[in-house]
Structures are given as structure tokens and as C-alpha cells.
Amino acid sequence: MSIETALMLYETKQEASYLQKAFYFSERSKALLLLSSLYDQEVSIFSGVPNAIIEQEKQFRNSINEYQGKINNEEKRCGEARTKLLDLYRQNLRSAQNEYTIFLQKMKEDYPNYYDLKFDPKIITSEEIQQELSQSNSTLLSYFMGDENIFVFHLEPNSIQVRKIENAKLIAADVITLYELVNDKAKFEFSPQKTYESFADKAGHLYDVLVGPELSESDYDRLTIVPDGVLSYLPFELLLSSQGPAKRNYAVLAYLLNDFAVSYSPSSSIFMLMNEFNHKNERYMGFAPNYEGQNYAGQGKQMENLDFNTAEVSFAAKLFGGDSWIGKDVFEDLFKSNSANVGILHLAMHGEVEDEHPLLSKLYFNSSVNEDGMLHTYEIYGLEIPSQLVILSACNTARGKLVTGEGILSLERAFQYARSASLLSTLWKVDDAASAAITQQFLTGIKEGQPKDVALQQAKLSYLSSATPDKLPPFYWSSFKLTGSIYPLNTQSNPWYVWLGVGLLGICIALFYVRRRLANVSS
């Protein structure tokens, strides 16, 4: 049964079970490889599989990713020596893949329950998602892009609805047009009025088509988006719920951001799973490299220094009382040796996206004797980074190659594989000053105990209320997106209001016993 068949039966028979089946089929089309990876730890606990087997399976996957990354890297170069090295990597990849196939077959024979759970991961039901939404007091929109139509599932704590949107290809084209417009800084600078009009037209139209019918009737102010296809490139916060003034004035536009704290997830199942991660480490660690005189092997490029990354990380380290690595000794191996024991991981540095070879997308540290300074996606897949929050204030960390059934293969996705609960990332090359302002305000909200989606919403609204008119276009602020857990940081210490409540309770108990004793004395 397909999504469309299930929905046809729902329209005919008006039985909720068919709507729930349609949602299930939509979920099965989203990020199953990531979901399977995230379930690994939970599944192994209940299936009785030895840790050695789990680690061996992980090592096979890491080896395959590493060889694939090295092959992609060598294919970009040339020369006889390179050809020989490329042949060696290809041979090693085939060998690793063959060994992995044999290993999986034996795993299927020896541990059939684990194998079934791992490679056919549990899809969360709509009822389970609704229970999660009642906990967070929020609403969720999950999209499925077909060849001709888009289906949007609207889930709230007590309801589920679905709507068919026709002309999927035209809408996809509009999304790409808007994406290319808002990430082009030059258009906002050199043709400001024309760009303003084009932006307002597309952002208003896409609001009406994609979210208007659902959000106009919602009583909630927190929204999770589960995108599909090219919708993954769209920052929904910049959509416009009503028409603005004809003359350029970004300050007064009716952004979706004004009404909703927005977060994103590759699937509803992953949204629920990442919200349930119980990471408790509160340790902050920030990295802000200085690139002066830094060269990278085989890159033939010199990185420009970032003007505000040092101040951004220094501010956060003071705020959280953690560790900061700033300057020319911000080494890749330093990150790797600490990444498994960090609660808040902050990477304020250059990033680079390889659209055709996503495993080669990278973050730029300083090079050292042991490492080349380029942290590739395929390396992140091999790490454990159980952080509560990862801030990727580098460029393009949420952008990557769009793969049917998996979504965008980005640096952000690699950190999700590494079991990071929440990620703040960017969809395009960000302005350094705007990035620092938004990130600092976001972290201030996090420190105060705000939910992560609310902290980002308030940080963006604060930026919009204080930036100069030339820095108000969505290029400057809408690139940032929050993916994963939306809850406040899981802290060991209780906030002040908890202790106040305990104190007041103690006073009440004391007064009760004093009055009781006085009553006994008087009698």
C-alpha cells in the first residue's frame, strides 16, 4: 500500500487507521540509515549482543566510509602515484565491503532479533509523536514530496490531519529560487528594492502553499518541521504570513519567526529519539582557529581569518565556565581527543561543502604533526560525540547533497550519526558579525534555561530588533537552523526557582509544626 492509496481509503471510509498508515509510509521514506544508526545503542541493550560484536560492526562501517572518502579525495587529483594510491584504496574498499557482507550474514544467523531491529528500525506511530508533542506543547508538520503532489501531515497533541498540495515540481522550483535569492548577499546590496520585492513575493506565496492552512488555526507557538526533498533547503522562519509594505522595510515583515519557535528533524521518529537522548554532560568546549600562515595539504588555498570567532567563543566560555581553544594551536587532534566528553561543543571556524562528494565536506582546524587540520565528514562518522548541543557556526554546515530517502548529507548529519542531541548549523555562508551576535544571544538563552528552539527564536528576534537596516535582509539571520532535541539543557544542578520552591516548602512545614506545638501547649 502506498501513501496515496492509504489516503484514498481514508477519504472513502473516514477511518483513522488509514491516515495513520499513510503517516507510517511517509516516515519509512525518511532517513532510515540515520534512524538505524541512532537505534544501535538502544537495540544492543535489549538484544543481548556482546559489545565486541557491536564495535566490530561499527568498525566495518567506519572503514567503508573512510576508504570511500579517500577515494573521492584522490579522484580529484591526478598523476601516476595518485592512480596507484587510488587503485589501492578501491581494492581496500572492496575487501572491506566483502568482509562486512560476510559479517552481517553471520550476525543474522547468530543474533536474528538484533539484526531485524537494526535493519528494520522501529517507526514511531502518530500516536507516539502526539504524546511527545503534548510534553513539549508544540505542533509538527511532516512533508512527503511525490512526483506530482506534496502531502503535509499536521500533528498536534490531540489531532492529526493531512493535506494534499498539487504542482510539486512548481513548488520545488519556487523553493530553489527563494533559497538562491536569500543566500546571495550581493543581490541584497546591489539591487535592494528588486530583491526585496522578489523575496516578499516568493516568501508569501510559499507560506500560503506550504503552511498557511495549518498554522492559521494552530493554538501553539512551537513548531517542528520534518522536510522532504528540496524543502530541506528552506528556512521556514522567513516565510511571510501577510503582505508587507511595497517600499523596502525588512523590519516590519510578518515572518513566521514572529509567531513560532521553529526546529527541524530528518524524520518524526528521529525527532522523538533525539528528544529522548539523556546526555547529561554540561562541559563547554569551544574552538576558534586563527588561520594566519596556515596551509592545507592539497588544497592550494589560504583561509581568511574570521573577525568575530574569537570573541564568540570567549564569550561562551565565560558564560558556561568551560574551556576555549583560540588561536593558532586549535588542532584537529585536540578536538578528536576531547569530543567524546563535551556537553556543549562550539565550533566557530571555516567549513566547506563538497556537493558531489559529501564525505569530503570538512571543517578547518589548524594542522599539526599528526593531523592535516581538515576534519572530514567521513571522520566524524567514526566518532562518538554525545553532546547535548553542538554549535556549528561555520559556513554551510547544514548544506550538502540531497539524497532521496535520506535527506541532505551534510556536516550536520554526520554529527547526528555521532549521537549529538541538538545541532545549531547554517544553510549558507554566513556573515561573521551577524553569526556572532545571534550565537551569543542564543547561548545566553540556553544558559538561562530556555528550550533550545525558543532560545534561537529569541536570538533572531533580538537581532532583527537591533540590527541596522542594511543588515536586516534574511541573508544575515535566517541561515541558522536548530535540528534535534528542543528541550533545555539537562543540568545536574537545579535552577534557582527549584531551590526557592524547596525553601518555601520548608518554611511552610516549619510553620505547621510551630502552630501545632503552640496549639498543644495552649490546650
Image (tube, grey):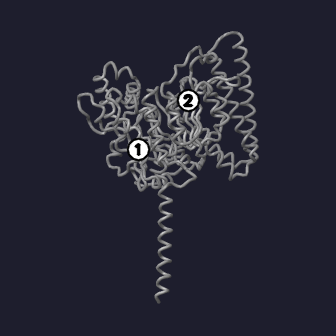
Vertical order, 198 against 82 (above or below)? below
* Residue 230 shows in the view: no
Q: Residue at x 51, y 68 (%)?
A: 506
Outermost residue, top direction?
79
Label 1, residues with CA under 10 Å away: few <14, some 14-19, many ≥20: many
User: Amino acid type of disc 1?
Assistant: Ala
Q: Nearest to the eye among marks 2 and 1: give it.
A: 2
Of residues 421 and 443, the one drawn nearer to the viewer in this rendering: 443
**Numbered circle sitting on residue 261:** 1
**How far across and down, in percent of the image, does residue 72 sit?**
63, 21
Of residues 78 and 229, the one drawn nearer to the viewer in this rendering: 78
**Cβ–Cβ below 8 Å for labels 2 and 1?**
no
Q: Residue at x 30, y 27 (%)?
A: 196
Q: Secondary structure at mark 1?
A: strand
Label 2, residues with CA under 10 Å away: few <14, some 14-19, many ≥20: many
Vertical order, 23 against 289 (above or below)? below
* Residue 303 shows in the view: yes
Q: Tell me: 14 left or right of 318.
A: left
**How far across and down, in percent of the image, does residue 151 sit?**
42, 41
**Numbered circle sitting on residue 113:** none
Q: Residue at x 54, y 31 (%)?
A: 410
Q: Secondary structure at mark 2?
A: strand
**Numbered circle sitting on residue 288:** 2
Outermost residue, bottom direction?
523
